[in-house]
């Protein structure tokens, strides 16, 4: 069934961090923790061994609004989220995340790193992550273009992977988080 599959796209709603659902045992569980558990089960399943994974963190638009009112620490997995936010908000480089990131952008990065570290600890491989605003088709298109790039990189690896001048590392510890 998965013979020609080279990339698994896994979606998680960022805005679920304070939501709850009933799990298979009938217990009330945080939806982000359910997503984490499902993610762990999928990435460690032998069927997906050696496949690339793209994590799409969706609903950033809702998340960015919510995070201003509801702390990320509502989810136990994110209990050590403690961002440092500049008190001097300037209009210079407002679109540059590195110059003055919003609380939502900091929280997105934090969640992405949590998933990347989890993935690396389970597989010794690099997790690719994309941000999507569900109501903006352009952001969905960008994430899908990114998935195409990942597949292209994967095709190039065998060709250049054995060269001492390769930009691709076979050492899992060299992957950035």
Image: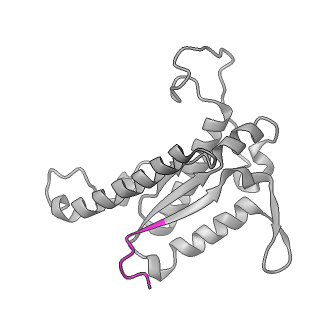
Lateral position of residue 56 relative to residue 167, left or right? right
Q: Percent position (x, y) of residue 103?
A: 67, 33
Q: Nearer the viewer, residue 144 or 68?
A: 144
Colour pattern of the rendering = one colour
Q: In this view, does 33 lie above or below 174?
A: below
Question: At 13% from the left edge and 57% from the top edge, which residue is drawn?
Answer: 163
Indicate whether residue 7 is drawn in magenta. Answer: yes
Tell me if I can see residue 81 in this picture: no
Lateral position of residue 55 relative to residue 108, left or right? left
Lateral position of residue 85 relative to residue 141, left or right? right
Q: Find residue 49 and report its image quarter.
A: bottom left
Q: Is residue 170 above or below residue 97?
A: below
Q: Nearer the viewer, residue 104 or 142?
A: 142
Question: At 74% from the left edge and 37% from the top edge, which residue is drawn?
Answer: 65
Q: Is residue 152 above or below residue 132?
A: below
Q: Which residues make up the magenta segment?
A: 1-8
Tell me if I can see residue 80 in this picture: yes
Q: Find residue 39 and report its image quarter.
A: bottom right
Q: Is residue 61 above or below residue 157?
A: above
Question: At 59% from the left edge and 29% from the top edge, which residue is drawn?
Answer: 101
Name the residue at the front extreme. 137
Q: Percent position (x, y) of residue 151?
A: 33, 61
Question: At 44% from the left edge and 85% from the top edge, which residue is drawn?
Answer: 1
Q: Percent position (x, y) of residue 160?
A: 17, 58
Q: Percent position (x, y) of residue 149?
A: 34, 54
Q: What secondary structure characterizes most of the magenta part?
A: loop
Name the residue at the bottom extreme. 1
Indicate whether residue 58 is drawn in magenta. Answer: no
Q: Nearer the viewer, residue 140 or 167?
A: 140
């Amino acid at each position: 069934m998965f013979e020609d599959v080279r990339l698994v796209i896994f979606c998680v709603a960022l805005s679920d961090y304070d939501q709850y659902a009933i799990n298979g045992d009938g217990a009330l569980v945080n939806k982000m923790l359910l997503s984490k558990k499902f993610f762990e089960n999928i990435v460690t399943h032998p069927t997906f061994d050696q496949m690339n994974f793209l994590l799409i963190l969706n609903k950033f638009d809702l998340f960015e609004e919510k995070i201003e009112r509801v702390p990320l620490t509502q989810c136990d997995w994110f209990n050590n989220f403690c961002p440092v936010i500049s008190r001097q908000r300037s209009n210079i480089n407002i679109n540059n995340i590195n110059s003055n990131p919003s609380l939502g952008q900091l929280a997105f990065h934090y969640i992405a790193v949590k998933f990347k570290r989890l993935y690396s600890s389970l597989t010794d491989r690099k997790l690719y992550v994309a941000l999507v605003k569900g109501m903006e088709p352009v952001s969905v298109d960008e994430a899908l273009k990114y998935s195409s790039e990942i597949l292209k990189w994967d095709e190039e690896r065998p060709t250049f992977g054995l060269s001492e001048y390769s930009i691709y590392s076979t050492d899992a510890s060299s992957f950035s988080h």
